[in-house]
Amino acid sequence: MPLIGTFGSGDVRGFGFSRGGVRPISVDYLIVAGGASGGDWPGGGGGAGGFRTSFPGGTKIEINKKSTTITVGSGGAGPSGPAPAEAGRGGVSSVAGATTIESAGGAKGGGNPANVPSYSGGSGGGGGHTAPDAGAGNVPPTSPPQGNPGGATPPGFQAGGGGGAGGAGSNCGPMTTGQGGPGGSGSSNSISGSAVTYAGGGGGGCYWRGTTGGSGGPGGGGNAAPASPSTEQPFGTGSPGTDGLGGGGGSGGTHGKGGSGIVILRIPSTEIPSGLAVAPGTNTLTDHPSGDKIATFTVSGTLTI
């Protein structure tokens, strides 16, 4: 996969602030990487983006730099047009920063018939029809785990689901059913003040006429497209993973793209500096009833303290 600056595609590099002569503040964080796209013909579901958080009850991060760049990773790209069968594309990084916290992007699902394997990442891609092994999740390893493996594919004309932050992708059904494997479930977190489920895996594809693609995992995973009712061919495009949740894309005749990631910082009421701001305006700074401030980055920007 191509490199994005100093970060490998699929990486999410967390907090890495340097001293800047300002009063340090301690914040909770949530970093979700971009999810991967699913594979084609019928390929495995895309793995969800890696999921790392300190909330609730984890170790906060100290911010000590006046202005910090926050980079929000995109999801793995969808198809550019009619194309031969191929694997999906891995998710890209989200970045924020103090002690380095790194969360890996979603791993692409296996493709068919090019014998393209699934890949490993924050959550693993599902195995494809001709490359049945599932991709590993939580790569590189973190504690607690940032994701789970994809589902495997026994011989047949279907594929496994992509892994999610809260559970592994499911293996596909037996050859006699042609059922694609569902994507793994995501993880719920309320750092924003409301419970939101992030990083669900994409559904695995199917092949036999009239069979059903795997459903996307809760947390933004995309559904796989159903097979054609009249021919033994994949039908349509898999649903994309949800942007802002880091969901994996579903498989299909052509794969669905992965969902973009998100970075959320929660600044305690006792730590809020007078110059706190986020940019650009697409990102938000909101008040929590407790008095905390919630900085939400859905696109790349800056945090000023």
Image (cartoon, helix red, strand yellow):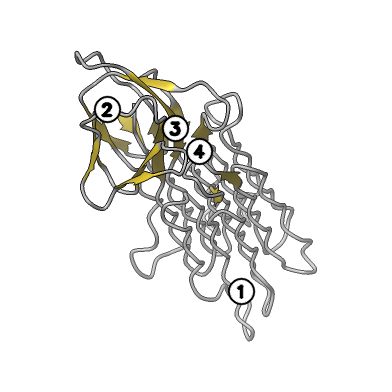
Q: Earlier in the sequence, mark 4 or mark 1?
A: 4
The residue that label 3 is drawn on is 29
Distance of label 2 from label 4 (alpha carbons): 30 Å
Given the image, on which type of amino acid does mark 4 rest? Gly
- Depth check, mark 3 against mark 4: the one in front is 3
Secondary structure beneath label 4:
loop
Task: Identify the image quadrant of the N terminus.
Answer: top left
The residue that label 1 is drawn on is 226
- Depth check, mark 4 against mark 1: the one in front is 4
Q: Residues within 10 Å of mark 4 (few under 14, many from 20)?
A: many
Secondary structure beneath label 2:
loop
Secondary structure beneath label 1:
loop
Secondary structure beneath label 3:
strand
Task: Where is residue 47? Give x, y as percent.
Answer: 54, 47
| Residue in the image at 63% along x and 54% along y | 183
User: Does 227 sit left or right of 89 as displayed?
Assistant: right
Distance of label 3 from label 1 (alpha carbons): 38 Å
User: Does 269 sit left or right of 208 as displayed?
Assistant: left
Q: Earlier in the sequence, mark 3 or mark 1?
A: 3
Given the image, on which type of amino acid does mark 3 rest? Tyr
| Residue in the image at 67% along x and 72% along y | 212
Along the line of sight, the residue nearer the viewer: 193 or 43: 193
Distance of label 4 from label 1 (alpha carbons): 27 Å
Q: Mark 4 and mark 2 in contact (Cβ < 8 Å)? A: no
Instruction: Please give the label number shown on residue 50.
Output: 4
| Residue 236 visible in the current orientation | yes
Q: Earlier in the sequence, mark 3 or mark 4?
A: 3
| Residue in the image at 67% along x and 58% along y | 182
Q: Earlier in the sequence, mark 2 or mark 1?
A: 1
